[in-house]
Amino acid sequence: MSAASAGSARSSGSVRSAGSDGSAESAGSSGSARSTGSAPASGSAGFDLRHHGDAEVRGADAALTDLAVNVRSGTPPEWLKARIAASLDGLAAYPDGRAAREAVAARHGLPAGRVLLTAGAAEAFVLLARALPSRRPVVVHPQFTEPESALRDAGHTVERVVLDERDGFRLTPGAVPEDADLVVIGNPTNPTSVLHPADALAELARPGRTLVVDEAFMDAVPGERESLAGRTDVPGLVVLRSLTKTWGLAGLRIGYVLAEPDTVTALERVQPLWPVSSPALVAAEACCTPSALAEAAYAADRMAADRAHLADRLAELAEVRVCGPAAGSFLLIRLPGAAAIRTRLRELGFAVRRGDTFPGLGPDWLRLAVRDPATTDRFVIALAKAVAESAD
């Protein structure tokens, strides 16, 4: 992709940080990445950090064909729903997470003391923001915006390292300030679908630094290549995982943290009692069985094929630029007049995710969830129609 995003001016050779008043200060060199601060309100600097894809398909809009939410369609599977339903007979008892914690630990080859179960990965961001002291937290953007929201809601001044479209939104470890003591990055990253090399992420580790890698979409990557989930040799590493995307459990809220035992203990201290429900614990245990992992692996392969089909069809439209190579269950695209086209797509029956709420992007960006080829073909016809009408 060539030109810079309309919503994010690019600097060359410098990183900049801005305080809560928006004023910029020089912070050193980082190639073409840049860093900007943010105002205290959650919608800072024109970015609505609390907007998420589910807002596109609420209420009457639920009838739209959903390409806005990155949850695998046709989920949860029947066997998982049956396991969850059977757990309802035990709702009178307080949740006991020991079996699920052991199952998650075994799934990643780790001791149970390195696992914390959470009410979705989003809760983990809140726990990290409240439990870990940080003088200079840095969030690498464009990425899922909840980490920054949680940090700022906890009173932190957050610095953004904004990756450059001209570099394919790929990380250069030197772009992160050396004295940053908390660094958050997604892998594969939402919304860019970029999969960063595990070795490059590990290079970000420093003594005294907490390195948070959000792997919410890693189980959608064939072979989970570039995952850091089982690593114990990276100091300060915190890996977040979610069962929402592959298994269709967004409404159940289940995820987990993999980290050093001292970090797990610190997070657990600020977590409410019984934070994960009994049905969610049953789901976590069920999704770690060998048969479930085999099903997830098959789904990842199918997702990769469906994503390739979506990218090929989008390539037929000269006006559309696809960010790639992509590795997640979604694609980021750029096209002129995307905001108006998104509105027209809704009239044609399709919901897509706006991109202008992600720091580093702007109004010409949209994120598309990967769906089956038949749905993709219908969508591309609608997109071509919307694009043509916008040119008239």
Image (cartoon, rainbow, N blue to C red):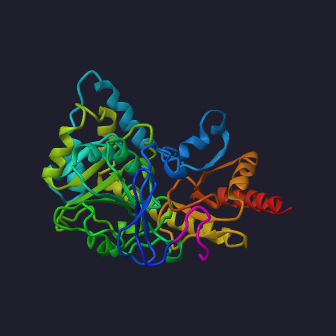
Is 222 positioned to the left or the right of 136 in the image? right
Q: Which residue is drawn at 53% across and 76% down?
A: 166
Q: x and y percent of residue 48 in the render?
A: 52, 47
Near-viewer residue (330 or 184) = 184
Between 323 and 133, the residue placed more toward the observer is 133
Q: Main secondary structure of the magenta part?
A: loop
Could you say where residue 207 lies in the image, as x and y percent from the top left? Answer: 16, 66
- Residue 8: say if magenta: yes
Q: Residue at x 55, y 61 (%)?
A: 361
> Does residue 95 appear to the left or right of 217 in the view shown?
left
Which residue reaches farthest top? Answer: 92
From what the image shows, is residue 31 above or below residue 256? below
Which residue is located at x 47 percent, y 58 percent? Answer: 190
Res. 126 in view: yes
Splitting the image into 4 quarters, where does residue 376 fall?
A: bottom right
Q: For the N terminus, which image quadrant?
A: bottom right
Looking at the picture, how far across and down is residue 171, in whole percent? Answer: 40, 72
Q: Where is residue 23 in the image (x, y as percent from the top left)?
A: 45, 57
**Magenta region: which residues?**
1-10
Write the residue at 55% across / 51% down.
46
Q: Quadrant of the C terminus?
A: bottom right
Who is closer to the viewer here, 31 or 105? 31
| Quarter of the image where one finds residue 93 | top left
Location of residue 156 with respect to 142 vertically, above or below: above
Report if residue 285 is visible in the image.
Answer: no
Number of numbered discs visible in the structure rendering: 0
Viewer-proximal residue among 66 and 289: 66
67 to 331, vertically: above or below: above
| Residue 350 lies in the magenta stretch | no
